[in-house]
């Protein structure tokens, strides 16, 4: 008897970018090794879309430049697209301590120690579920900077792992007056790193990454500045979903992307759902 299919959960992830002294840099977090999903791996801030990301009737009122209709159109869904942008902003705040929101025409500044301490408490409250982002914005007179968050790519976890996600990847410029930091729970380390350097360290076995992270790093590594990335991403249309397949054979576990040799045959040879812990991290085909 075949096992029950693993449900696919909607998720959102954001590549937080800045212009460093040596070129473009991205903020990355290392997940706790005890985590059920991709423990010990370096990732971008992100996670599943929660009911709170779509359930506030006044949500659009605290979002700048995009509404649900425009977000849904960009993602190719009938409705609910705004929730992915809100989830990306919420996860960035929870996991990295960076709030992509504006006051007036500027991104939120947390250079004042007292204000930084207050927003650190907000971070804990949002993470615990005691406070919604929309309510935080209403308290502080802010608007979520959804118009400053670009839609980069769309990946779906292959059959095999016990958790599967339908993940939209986004990009955003880091607010200049905020300092990102891992949460010390789900994520235990963090750093700013050039995309090319992250890929080099991965190839050297020093920086554990999974396939979607690798491909998104390769994408932004083509650009020299944040402005170049945002301009390119802003012009993208009809972004297709990428669903790799997993093959276990005599050579071990392989991840095959669409269009690569063996992809069409991989479905028949894919491991049974639930037999793999996390997402495998072999050399991609």
Image (spheres, helix red, strand yellow):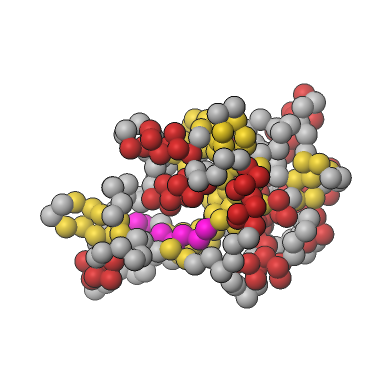
Return the x and y of residue 179 as percentages of the image width and height: 66, 30
Relative vertical location of residue 187 with respect to residue 234 in this rendering, above or below? above
- Give the image quarter of residue 5: bottom left
> Would residue 261 be counted in the magenta stretch?
no
Would residue 25 appear left or right of 282 to someone viewing this image? Answer: right
Instruction: State the residue at coordinates (71%, 33%).
Output: 176
Would residue 171 appear left or right of 99 to someone viewing this image? Answer: left
Instruction: State the residue at coordinates (50%, 35%).
Output: 194
Q: Residue furthest left?
A: 250
Return the x and y of residue 110 as percentages of the image width and height: 76, 31
- The region drawn magenta spans 153-162
Quadrant of the image containing the N terminus? bottom left
Return the x and y of residue 180 as percentages of the image width and height: 62, 33
> Would residue 161 be counted in the magenta stretch?
yes
- Give the image quarter of residue 273: bottom left
Instruction: State the residue at coordinates (31%, 51%).
Output: 284
Would residue 102 appear left or right of 82 to someone viewing this image? Answer: right
Quadrant of the image containing the C terminus? bottom left
Q: Residue furthest bottom?
A: 78
Instruction: State the residue at coordinates (57%, 37%).
Output: 24
């Amino acid at each position: 008897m075949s096992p029950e299919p693993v449900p696919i959960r909607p998720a959102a992830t954001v590549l937080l970018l800045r212009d460093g002294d040596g070129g473009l840099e991205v903020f990355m977090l290392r997940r706790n090794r005890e985590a059920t999903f991709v423990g010990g791996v370096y990732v971008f801030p992100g996670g599943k879309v929660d009911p709170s990301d779509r359930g506030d009737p006044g949500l659009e009122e605290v979002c700048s430049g995009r509404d649900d209709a425009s977000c849904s159109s960009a993602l190719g869904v009938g409705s609910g697209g705004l929730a992915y942008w809100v989830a990306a902003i919420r996860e960035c705040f929870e996991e990295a301590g960076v709030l992509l929101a504006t006051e007036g025409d500027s991104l939120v500044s947390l250079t004042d120690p007292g204000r930084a301490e207050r927003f650190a408490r907000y971070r804990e409250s949002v993470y615990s579920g005691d406070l919604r982002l929309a309510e935080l914005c209403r308290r502080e007179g802010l608007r979520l900077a959804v118009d400053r968050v670009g839609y980069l790519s769309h990946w779906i976890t292959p059959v095999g792992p016990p958790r599967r996600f339908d993940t939209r990847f986004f990009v955003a410029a880091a607010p200049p007056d905020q300092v990102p930091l891992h949460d010390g729970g789900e994520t235990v380390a963090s750093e700013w790193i050039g995309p090319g350097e992250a890929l080099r360290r991965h190839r050297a076995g020093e920086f554990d990454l999974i396939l979607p992270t690798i491909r998104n790093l390769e994408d932004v590594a083509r650009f020299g500045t944040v402005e170049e990335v945002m301009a390119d991403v802003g012009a993208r249309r009809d972004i297709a979903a990428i669903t790799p397949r997993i093959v276990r054979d005599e050579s071990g576990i392989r991840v095959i992307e669409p269009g690569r040799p063996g992809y069409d045959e991989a479905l028949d040879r894919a491991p049974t759902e639930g037999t793999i812990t996390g997402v495998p991290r072999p050399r991609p085909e």
